[in-house]
Image (spheres, helix red, strand yellow):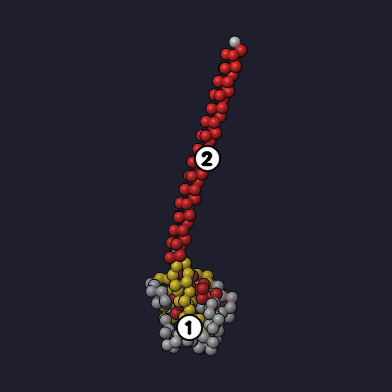
Amino acid sequence: MARKLILKINILFLFLILALLSLLLNGCLKSKQVEKERKKILTEAKKETHLVEKGTEKERIKITLYFSDKQAMYLIPEEREIKKTEDVAKIALEELIKGPKDPKLFPTIPEGTKLLGIEVKDGLAKVNLSQDFKDNYPLGSAGENITIFSIVNTLTEFTSINKVRFLVEGKPLEVSGSNYDLVNQFFLRNEDIIKKLNSSGGK
């Protein structure tokens, strides 16, 4: 009787051990499977991130901005790379307002000026600027030409724009003492004010 009881206990104990081993083995396999899936997901995610970054790098364009030379007599082009956008004209003007990166070039936009908006229709760009543009507007033919045509020439780099009109706070720009009829006049591109670079690329 005692022998049978001991045998039953041993069998039960062995069954419990086998069951425990089975659970541990299943858990280990599941853990390995989970880790395998996790690594697979991470690898795919890295590939996707790389493709997105690579695509983003390609989605950049070059624009040409016009800044003043030292004598404030001529405009000199400066290329800048920006993210591709439908508002490229707006971004170009914002970059122009920021000023040149080349230390040999000089800003052309009156201090404090902000771009309030730009509307392009039928080749005409209406540029709406803040009051600072009018308050700090440079009088005198040289300074005025540099300011006006730095904007005009920058915008007419785009095929959708061939003429520019200026607004301040939504109203036609009017400056006493200006050489231009700023209220009614629109401006075409001026190639003559662009400084010609010599063969060695000097300015």
In percent of width and height, residue 42 lies at 49, 50
Question: Closest to the observer: 106 or 1?
Answer: 1
Question: Closest to the observer: 118 or 98?
Answer: 98
Q: Are marks 2 and 1 in contact (CB under 8 Å)?
A: no
Question: Which numbered mark, 2 or 1, is in the foreground of this view?
Answer: 2
Question: The residue tagged with tag 2: helix, strand or loop?
Answer: helix
- The residue lying at 58 percent from left, 80 percent from top is 136
Task: Residue 147: tell me if it is visible.
Answer: no
Which of the 4 image quarters holds residue 111?
Answer: bottom right
Q: Which residue is labeled 1 in the image?
A: 76
- Give the label on residue 31, or none: 2
Which of the 4 image quarters holds residue 89?
Answer: bottom left
Instruction: Classify 60 as above or below 112.
Output: above
- Give the label on residue 128, or none: none
Q: Amino acid at mark 2?
A: Ser
Instruction: Classify 157 as above or below 10.
Output: below
Q: Amino acid at mark 1?
A: Ile
In percent of width and height, residue 135 lies at 58, 79
In percent of width and height, residue 148 lies at 49, 81
Question: Closest to the observer: 201 or 193?
Answer: 201
Gap in angstroms between the C-alphas marked 2 and 1: 65 Å
Q: Residues within 10 Å of mark 1 (few under 14, many from 20)?
A: many
Direction from residue 8 to residue 191 in the image, left or right:
left
- The residue lying at 54 percent from left, 31 percent from top is 21
In percent of width and height, residue 116 lies at 52, 70
